[in-house]
C-alpha cells in the first residue's frame, strides 16, 4: 500500500517541510486541495501538514472530518520558534482532546513575513498594526509582533522534520 504527505501551504513553509518529509520517507506528496476523499482507502499512512493563520490551521476541519476514522500524522507550521505556550494554543484552538489522542501531532517552526500577506488579511493586519503601535506598555510578545513588520523571520530548517520522519518510519 502507498503512503502520502498532504499539505496546505499559503506562503511556502508548510510545502517546504512536506517536500523534505516526502523525500526523506520516499512517500508521494500532494497539495490537499488536489486529494479526493475517496482516495483515502488507497493509502496506508498519511501525513497532513498545514500552516497556521491567525491561530487556525488551514483546511484542518476538512482533514479531521475526512480522517475521523483513520489516524494520521498532523503537523502545524507557524511563525514561532518552538514556543511551548503558542504550540499549546494551536493544539487547544484546533483540536478536541479526542482528536489529539487519536491522531499524532507535531509542530514545525515556520516564519513570519508580513510582506507576503494580501487582500483583506493585509487590511486587517494594517489596522491591527496601527492599534499595536499606539499601545503603551507593550508586552514582549506584542513588541515581537511589531518587530515582525519590518524584520521577517524564518525558522524553517530540515532538522525539524527528524521527529516526524522517525515516527513515520516506525509505522
Image (cartoon, rainbow, N blue to C red):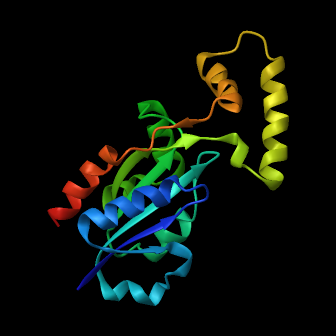
Residue 168: image quadrant is bottom left
- Is 94 on the left or on the right of 152, as rendered? left
Residue 78 makes an appearance in the image: yes
At horizontal 37% and vertical 54% (from top left) the residue drawn is 100
* Residue 58 spot, x, y in % from top left: 58, 60
- Is 4 on the left or on the right of 13, as rendered? left
Q: Considering depth in this image, is 40 or 80 the residue closer to the camera?
A: 80
Q: Is residue 76 above or below residue 144?
A: below
> Which residue is most to the top?
137
Residue 167: image quadrant is bottom left
* Residue 135 spot, x, y in % from top left: 79, 17
Label count reads 0
Quarter of the image with the C terminus is bottom left
At horizontal 24% and vertical 57% (from top left) the residue drawn is 165
Q: Is residue 130 above or below residue 125?
A: above
Residue 103 makes an appearance in the image: no
* Residue 122 spot, x, y in % from top left: 80, 46
- Is 54 on the left or on the right of 83, as rendered? right
Q: Is residue 112 above or below residue 143?
A: below
Quarter of the image with the N terminus is bottom left
> Which residue is most to the left?
170
At horizontal 52% and vertical 63% (from top left) the residue drawn is 60
* Residue 26 spot, x, y in % from top left: 26, 71
Residue 48: image quadrant is bottom left
Q: Considering depth in this image, is 30 or 142 the residue closer to the camera?
A: 30
Amino acid at each position: 500500500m502507498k503512503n502520502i504527505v498532504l499539505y496546505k501551504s499559503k506562503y511556502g513553509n508548510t510545502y517546504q517541510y512536506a517536500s523534505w518529509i516526502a523525500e526523506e520517507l520516499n512517500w508521494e506528496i500532494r497539495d490537499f486541495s488536489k486529494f479526493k476523499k475517496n482516495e483515502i482507502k488507497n493509502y496506508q499512512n498519511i501525513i497532513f501538514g498545514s500552516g497556521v493563520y491567525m491561530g487556525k490551521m488551514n483546511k484542518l476541519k476538512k482533514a479531521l472530518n475526512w480522517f475521523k476514522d483513520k489516524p494520521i500524522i498532523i503537523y502545524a507550521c507557524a511563525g514561532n520558534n518552538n514556543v511551548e505556550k503558542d504550540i499549546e494554543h494551536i493544539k487547544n484552538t484546533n483540536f478536541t482532546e479526542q482528536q489529539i489522542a487519536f491522531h499524532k501531532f507535531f509542530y514545525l517552526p515556520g516564519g513570519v513575513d508580513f510582506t507576503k500577506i494580501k487582500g483583506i488579511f493585509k487590511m486587517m493586519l494594517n489596522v491591527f498594526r496601527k492599534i499595536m503601535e499606539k499601545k503603551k506598555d507593550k508586552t514582549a510578545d506584542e513588541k515581537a509582533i511589531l518587530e515582525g513588520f519590518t524584520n521577517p523571520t524564518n525558522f524553517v530548517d530540515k532538522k525539524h522534520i527528524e521527529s516526524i520522519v522517525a515516527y513515520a518510519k516506525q509505522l
